[in-house]
Image (spheres, helix red, strand yellow):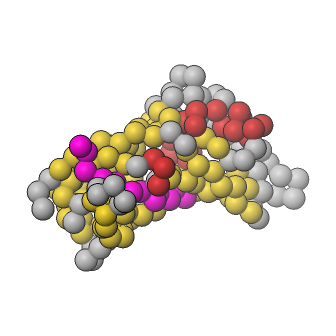
Amino acid sequence: MSKTKLIVDPAHSSIDFSVKHMMVTKVKGTFHEFETSINADPEDLTTADIEFNIDMASVDTGSKDRDNHLKSADFFDVENKPKMTFKTTNIVKTSDEEYDVSGDLTLNGVTNKQTFKIVFEGQGQDPWGNQVFGFTGEGSLNREEYGLTWNASLETGGVLVGKDVKITMDLQLKKDA
């Protein structure tokens, strides 16, 4: 299959994250608004051009107060830095269905190299006759490397917010009409 423009079906896709809270539990959240530009052979991602733009104001952790704090200058500063972006620089096939997708991730005005493990989950046809492709992905980033250093010390030792953030993606793509 040759390279083709693919679009994400937002109703069947998600970008989620989790981070340690109080050193004993995890807080999970999702970003509801994101855009993609993908030109790829869905069965061989090694030559793909992939870009993601995530609207940081769309963060949702299930707590309005926490979400507002995340949107503030203490964390995402959405008023001045509204997007997190990712653009591929290298893709390596690691097995029949798995890839290491590396690129430049920009968050809070800071750009670092990040690699995500992406798995091609398969393809099928939706009820409207569109060929769809499924991918899952995961990776992690150190939020402090992006200048997101807000924290609070706990009386019992440790800190309120962990520095490692796990990112997971479930994506359903289809060919652009």
Q: At x 25% / y 45%, what residue is drawn?
A: 176
Which residue is at the front of the view, 19 or 46? 46
Image quadrant occupied by the C terminus: top left
Give residue 70's quadrant in the image: top right
30 relative to 123, above or below: above
Q: Is residue 118 left or right of residue 24?
A: left
**Magenta span has 175?**
yes
Q: Is residue 77 visible?
A: yes
Which residue is at the front of the view, 100 or 163? 100
Image quadrant occupied by the N terminus: bottom left
Residue 76 percent coordinates (x, y): 58, 34
Which residue is at the front of the view, 174 or 104? 174
**Magenta span has 157?**
no
Residue 114 percent coordinates (x, y): 39, 53
Q: Is residue 18 left or right of residue 84?
A: right
Q: Is residue 85 left or right of residue 63?
A: left
Q: Which residues are magenta?
A: 165-177
> Please, what is the dominant secondary structure of the magenta stretch?
strand
Q: Is residue 53 left or right of residue 31?
A: left
